[in-house]
Amino acid sequence: MIIPFRSHFNRRPTYFKEKILASVLPGYRILHQPKLHTIRRSSQYRPGQFLHMAYGVRTKKYEQFNRNIVGLEKCTGIQRFEIAWSEARHENLSPSYTIPFDSRFARVWVDDRPLSFMRIEAVAMNDGFDSTQDFLNWFSTDFQGEIVHWTDLKY
């Protein structure tokens, strides 16, 4: 299954290729925090399925960058992921489960469990973002999807 990645976001390089390679190749960790999974809207991925990670999908610049790299060839697991935005903090949730951001509040769930701010920060870093702010900018609207894993990490 092809997994497309963006090489740039907001005119800045994402370094997703290098971050993904850092998840299994120690030499890349010198400059890049490892990207240990990706979050996708679709539910087409399955554990054991071969992954083709690439930039430039459906273009002349197609580049599959995980070919023949042990540890990046297969999906190791899937987890449900959801982020919901609201204009007000929900009284029934502890403040640690709601993140204020740009006059709104974000709540995040993995496998139907609410995540604390510290766990959301871990998801953001492990998904290849430089900060939780970048993560929330990327997922700036309500979102339901799944986390596609290629390592043994689970939340």
Image: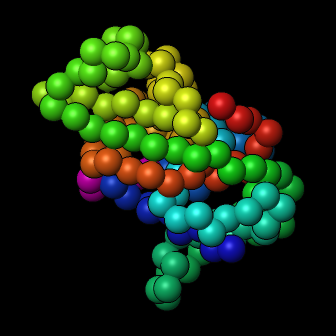
Q: Position of residue 54 (x, y in %)?
A: 59, 69
Between 146 and 7, the one lying in front of the other is 146
Q: Position of residue 85 (x, y in %)?
A: 27, 38
Residue at image coords 73%, 62%? 46
The quadrant the C terminus occupies is: top right
Residue 65 visible in the snapshot: no
Residue at image coords 58%, 47%? 80
Residue range highlighted in magenta: 10-14
98 in the magenta segment: no
Q: Can you name the residue that lies furthest to the front here?
A: 92
Residue 7 visible in the snapshot: yes
Give the main secondary structure, helix, strand or loop, of the magenta stretch: loop
Between 146 and 62, the one lying in front of the other is 146
Between 144 and 3, the one lying in front of the other is 144
Q: In the picture, residue 32 is in which quadrant? A: top right
Q: How many marks?
A: 0
Query: Is residue 102 found left or right of 134 in the rendered image?
Result: left
Q: Position of residue 68 (x, y in %)?
A: 83, 66
Residue at image coords 79%, 39%? 152
